[in-house]
Image (cartoon, helix red, strand yellow):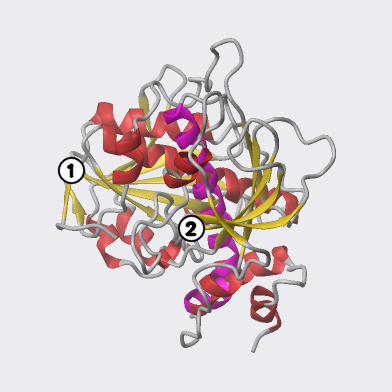
Amino acid sequence: MAPALEAHLAEDRPVDLVTALADARSPALPGPDTPAGTAVRAWQGHPHPIPQAGPGELDLRTLLHLSLAASDVSGRLRPASSAGALHPVDAELVVGTGCPLPPGRYGFDPLRDQVHHLGPEPQGIPPGVSVELNVTPRRTASHYGHRTWPLLLLDTGHAAAALWLAARALGLAAPVPRFDGLTEHPLAVLHVTQPQDGNGASPSLEASAPVPGELLARRSAPPPLTGTPHRDALRAVLATGVRASSGELAWCAAVGEPEPELVQPAPDNTLRPLAAGEARPTLARWAAGQAWLAEAGAVLLAYGCPSDADAPLIRRTHLRAGFAVHLAHLAALRHGLAARPVGSWQQADLGAALGAAPGRDWIVHGLALGTQSEQGTS
């Protein structure tokens, strides 16, 4: 077994993220599937149901139900996207006052909607709950092998966005995600509290708060996704991704009709050409050979993260990309589009393909769009 893949599977060892990303971007194919292990981390401590919130308490049970909990016994169907539906993201809850659980640290079981008490809360924890997101690499590595680590980070960003949207749906105070990339454990943290003085979540990333049904209905549409989105819808979905990525990434979209081209957001909130010509077949090759992308109505691309990026920058850009694509996915659904995140990219040096310096602008994440798709969800 390659050393990088061993690091993917060894949860108690730090990973060389620079090498792991270089391996993931290479054309090498993953080996045969290996056992994924359990769908939920084997939390220590006594399990507890999450009580219903009382008057004035944060509705922790609904927050987790709308964001991280599975809706089927296999654990595959959850409100947050995940590569291969393997769901490697684990959540630890640091509970303060104002919650239906006693203050303390808990591990969340998304299959049974219960928590395991792990220990006391740290000193000075504020009211509300801090959700710490970590990963169990083995789940994703079981199928994706050396391509695992970018997918783990993207999945964590999607989980953070699902929590952020759930807090908005419940009218809670804005949970500012911690995406500084400086720590491997946890990878991301969101602190959720009751609103103060009637102020809920900031509307800066989404024009209007979602309703619970929207979050539970979000699924990745199965390919093929055909039909070019209307220009206004494409512009709105791109704008959501741009806002949510907070300047960490650049964005564009490959479209096929009426003329094949790459377009990018302009300062005046319109779309302007980035490059002429058909890009989707190349994107299909770069995206682990997913041939259906060549016929997708449009493919949104978040790119950046140069070859010389250090581990904090790699973590930060991939976490932010997952977060932004998740919000863009919801925006697409609101415009009546079918959408599917695309996270595995090899040799996808978009900047070099457009004539810029190589190694500067790699595709980090994508979102395929269409006006229609096959029936069903994944």
Visible residue check, residue 183: yes
Q: State the SS at label 2.
A: loop
**Residue at 22%, 56% in the rendered image:** 295
Please report the residue visible at 37 percent of the width from the left and 66 percent of the height from the top: 285
Disc 1 marks which amino acid?
Thr
- Residue that mark 1 sits on: 371
Who is closer to the viewer here, 102 or 252? 102
Of residues 238 and 154, the one nearer the viewer is: 154
Residue 103, magenta (yes or no): no
Label at residue 41: none
- The picture places residue 209, in percent across and down from the top left corner, at 40, 25
Q: Is residue 356 visible?
A: no
Answer above or below: position of 240 versus 13: above
Quarter that holds the C terminus: bottom left
Q: Is residue 240 above or below residue 309?
A: above
- Say which element carries label 1: loop
The amino acid type, in three-letter code, at marker 2 is Pro
Given residues 24 and 114, the one toward you in this image is 114
* Residue under numbered circle 2: 110
Q: Which quadrant holds the N terminus?
A: bottom right
Which of discs 1 and 2 lies nearer the camera? The answer is 2
The crowd level at tag 2 (other Cα within 10 Å; few <14, some 14-19, many 20+) is: many
Residue range (magenta): 143-170
Residue depicted at 54% across the width and 12% down the height? 198
CA–CA distance between discs 1 and 2? 32 Å
Asked if residue 107 lies left or right of residue 376, the reply is right
**Badge 1 or badge 2: first in the primary sequence:** 2
> Which residue extends farthest top?
197
- Tag 1: Cα neighbours inside 10 Å, few (<14), some, or many (≥20)? some
Prevailing SS of the magenta stretch: helix
